[in-house]
Image (cartoon, rainbow, N blue to C red):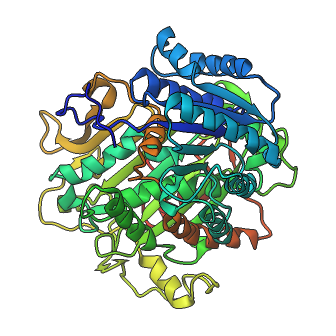
Amino acid sequence: MSVNPLVDPLDQRVPRVPPPCALTIFGVTGDLARRKILPAIYDLANRGLLPAGFSLTGVARSEWTTAEFVGQAHAAVASGARTPFRQRVWEQLSASMTYVSGDIAEASTYDRLRQVLDRSDASFGTGGRRVFYLSMPPATFGVICGHLASSGLAARGPDAKVVIEKPFGHDLSSAQALDATLSQVFDPASVFRIDHYLGKETVRGMLAMRFTNQVFEPLWCSEHVDHVQITMAEELGVGSRASYYDGIGATRDVMQNHLLQLLAIIAMDKPASFGAADLRAAKEAALAAVAIPGPVGECAVRGQYTAGWQGNIPVRGYLDEPGIRADSVTDTYGALKLAVRTDRWRDTPFYLRTGKRLGRRVTEVAIIFRRADNQAECAGAAQPGPVAEFGPAAEPVSAAASGPATEFAPAAESAAAATFGAKRPSGSPWPDFCLQGRPSGANALVIRIQPDEGITLRIGAKVPQTDMDVRDVTMDFSYGHAFTESLPDAYEPLILDVLLGQDPLFPRAREVDESWRVIDPVEEYWASLDSRPEPYQAGTWGPAGADRLLARDGREWRRP
C-alpha cells in the first residue's frame, strides 16, 4: 500500500491512499449510481483521496456515448455532491471516464469492457487491479460474475474485487446460494457487501464511544441497562420502489441488515483489536447470540400504512400506491423484541422497529438505563412484585397463562418469555425523587445516527428551590457543533475502504446468515397467518400492536 507523501504522518484521518485501480459500475444509469455512487466518487476526488492512476467505466443498456455518460455524471455530481464543485477536479475525473453500452447477458459486452480496461492499464497504470460494482438487482449477479470469469476480466486473487448492494438474498437459503455464486469467481475477502449504514460516521463513532470512554463500558450490561431501542423511521412512502418493495417489506429490507448490524455493534464484547478480523469476529459472536425470546406472535408486530397526513400534506395508503397489488400483505412496519444470550445482556431486551410513513425521518439507538433505587414510590405510583433473575415473578407464570405452544417456542419457553425482559421493580428506604407526582425518567444515552447526528445523555437534576423534585435534563453533543468538517456521505468511506482493500465493517457471509436466522422465523410465521398486517395511519408512529409489544413488559417507545 502506497504512502501519500503530502499527508502529515501525525494526521490519522487518512493515513493511506489506494493503489491505482479501475472501477467499473454495472447499472451506472440507475438511481443509486446517480444519487449516491457518482457524487461520492467525485467527493473522494475533490478531497484528494483517489489514486492518481484511476479510471471509471460505466456499463448499462442505454445507448449512450462516453460524452453523454460524462454529461449525465456531471449532472449527478452537480445535484448530489457534498463538497464544492471544482472545475479542475472534474476535468481530471471526467478524463478517466468511459462508457460501455451493452446487455449484461451478452458476451460481446464483456469483450468491449475488456478492451476498455486494458487501455486503462496502459493509460492510467491501473496494473490489472479491478473493482466491479454491481449496482444491479441480485438476480443478475450470477450472469455478470459468470461472464467476468469466462472473459478473463476477473480472476481469484486480491486484484479483483466485487461490490454488491443489499438485499443479500431474501432468506437464509437464497443468501447462501448468492454467496456460493460469488465465491466461484472471487475470494471471500474480495467480496464487499455494502450496508450503507455501516459507512455513516455516527455508526463508526459508536465503536469509539463504547471502548474509549471508561464512563460507559462498565455500565454496558444487564446490571445497569434496562433495555435498548433501535429505531429507523422514514417519512416517505414506497415511492418509485414499488416493484422491488412489494413482497419484500420493511423487515427484510431494513431490519435484516441495517438494524441487526446496529444491534451487533451495541451488543458485541470488546474485540481483541480494531482490526478487520477481530471486529468481524466480535460482531459475528453477537449476532450468533441473538434469539427471539418466545413465541413469534408475542415478539413481532407488522403493520401497513393507510392514508393520512405527512405534516400538512395528505398522502395515500400503501395499497393505493402505484404498482402495489390491492391484496398485498407486505409489511411497511416491523417491530421485534429480541434477546442477546450472553452474560453481558442476560436480562436486557432489545426492541427494534422500522417503518415507512412514520412521524418523522430519524434513526437512533437509545440505551435506557435502570431506574435508581431511590425512585421507589411516588404519589400513586403502582409497584410491581418481587423479582426473579429474568424479570418479575410475583407468581410463577404458567404455560397456559402465556398462550399455547407454537413451532417457534414450546410451552415451557413461552412461560419464560413472559418474564424475560420485563421491568424490574425498584425498592429503597431513600427519599423519593419525583417530578409532578411521578418518578423522574430513567437515564438514557441516545445515539442520533440521522439527522442532527450526535449523542444525548438524559440525566436527572434537582429543580432549584424545591425540596427534592427532580427534572429530566439533557447533555448534548452534536457533530455539527463540535467539528468543523461536515460529515461525509456513507458511500464515501465505504468506496474508499473498497479501493484500499480494507473491510472492518463490511458484513461477511456469516453475519448475513446469522441475520437471516433471526428474521426467517418471523417471515415464516407471518406467511402462515390468514390475517393482514395491522393498519396504521400515515404520519403516526406505527400500529397499536407495537405499543402493546412494549406495554406487556411495562415499557413504552421513545418519541424521537
Q: Where the N terminus falls, by quadrant?
A: top left
Can residue 268 be spotted in the picture?
A: yes
Q: Residue at x 32, y 63 (%)?
A: 278
Q: Position of residue 486 (x, y in %)?
A: 37, 24
**In this rendering, position of residue 98 left or right of residue 493:** right
**In this rendering, position of residue 447 left or right of residue 61:** left
Q: Residue at x 51, y 73 (%)?
A: 292
Placement of 422 over or under 442, stated as above or below = below
Q: Position of residue 15 (x, y in %)?
A: 27, 37
Q: Position of residue 458 (x, y in %)?
A: 27, 43
Which residue occupies the foreground of this view, 159 or 41? Answer: 159
Q: Where the C terminus falls, by quadrant?
A: top left
Q: Residue at x 64, y 49 (%)?
A: 153
**In this rendering, position of residue 311 left or right of residue 258:** right
Can residue 439 be spotted in the picture?
A: no
Which residue occupies the foreground of this view, 355 or 209? Answer: 209
- Picture quarter containing residue 317? top right
Placement of 308 over or under 179, stated as above or below = above
Q: Residue at x 12, y 65 (%)?
A: 429
Total numbered labels: 0
Q: Position of residue 310 (x, y in %)?
A: 65, 31
Q: Residue furthest front?
A: 122
**In this rendering, position of residue 421 left or right of residue 405:** left
Q: Residue furthest right?
A: 326
